[in-house]
Image (cartoon, rainbow, N blue to C red):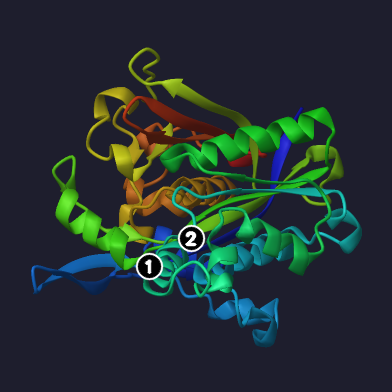
Amino acid sequence: MDIQVRGIGPLGGFGAGITPLEKCIDGRCDISPEMLTIEKNRQLMALACFKADTSRLIEFISPKKLRRIDHLSRMALLGAGLAIADAKLSPEELEDTGIILATGYGALDTGFSFLSSFLDKGDQLSKPTLFSNSVHNAAAAYISIFFGIKGPSLSVSQFDLSFASALLTAMLWIKEGRVKSVLVGGVDEYCDVLGYAAKNLHTTRNNLPLTLGEGGCFFVLSKSAVCNETGYARLAQVDIFDQKRTPFLAKNRLVILGSPGCGACNDMVGPTCICQDKLYGTFPSAAALDMGTACLGLKHKTLFNKITQGSWEGKKIDPNTILCVTPGDCLSGKIILKSNRNESQLS
């Protein structure tokens, strides 16, 4: 059964939507992270972070309705709205659509703010709005309410493997016929506590400077039979594997390697590996943005020309398949995407 990526909704430090992401991938737009300050022992330290802007959310939801919604849920709503609009899902189709939201950390800033109000004022006077927004499934609930999605809803939290786990479940829902389409995405936010931990505990990862980020990407997945248009790519395989027991080589395939493994897994993936940290930074759900860039690369064959220093054929890279790999300490996530076009169309 072919499962098509029907719509994409990316957001991050590069902006919100497909066009800003495409401009960053092919080099038409250079972005730089914001320089934040973290305090330690009464001294200020600089920290680079790609922050996401959710101002485009008013295109889908009125500002009045967003008054009590926190930043993580706003990012999730924006990504979901962009994906739904890109897929051109009708209200009737939304009734038979499921939601799966992946987040490695959840609403960090809201959670710590609630904890502070609890410690300062006790359980009777702590802020209830902060509590309701701090639970991991709040963002998925907002998506269901505002966009009228009536299918099953699930929130997944498994740190760097959150998005791969969510994608596995989305494929099962479609194959089982539970729903016709699934809105699946990953989203994570930055907060000062995370910045403090990153600055003090692991300022570098695999001897490379660590740049934090926030944002995510949402996708509308459907069977090929129900897609009105071709879509971006075919979702061929999703796997969570023991990287020590199941190494793989991809000498002729482009591999988008998630930041947790940047510089540490070159022996596992081969020479055609790229890392997109410079576009959106490091955060658990960045794997969703890796998949978004892969889908765009498969639809527009020349999108990665600057990265591969010329045409795909010149580098002997298979233009029909892209792997997205998120290495972890023990387990790794692997997503295989294939082009909708055949060889004759690519020649």
Q: Would you place residue 108 above or below residue 175 in this image? A: below
From the image, state whether disc 1 or disc 2 is nearer to you.
1
Label 2 packing within 10 angstroms: few (<14), some (14-19), many (20+)? many
Report helix, strand or loop for mark 2.
loop
Foreground residue among 252 and 123: 123
Q: Residue at x 48, y 60 (%)?
A: 107
Residue type (three-letter) at the residue carrying disc 1: Leu
Q: Position of residue 209 (x, y in %)?
A: 17, 53
Q: Residue furthest top?
A: 245
Q: Position of residue 239 (x, y in %)?
A: 53, 26
The residue indicated by pointer 2 is 107
Label 1 packing within 10 angstroms: few (<14), some (14-19), many (20+)? few
Q: Position of residue 76 (x, y in %)?
A: 59, 62
The answer to which of marks 1 and 2 sits earlier in the sequence is 2
Q: Residue at x 27, y 29 (%)?
A: 265
Q: Residue 289, can we see it?
A: yes
Q: Residue furthest right?
A: 92
**Side (left or right) of 209 relative to 177:** left
Q: Position of residue 324 (x, y in %)?
A: 46, 37
**Side (left or right) of 241 relative to 235:** left
The residue indicated by pointer 1 is 119
Report helix, strand or loop for mark 1.
helix
**Side (left or right) of 122 relative to 204:** right
Q: Residue at x 64, y 79 (%)?
A: 66
User: To which quarter of the image does residue 116 belong?
Assistant: bottom left
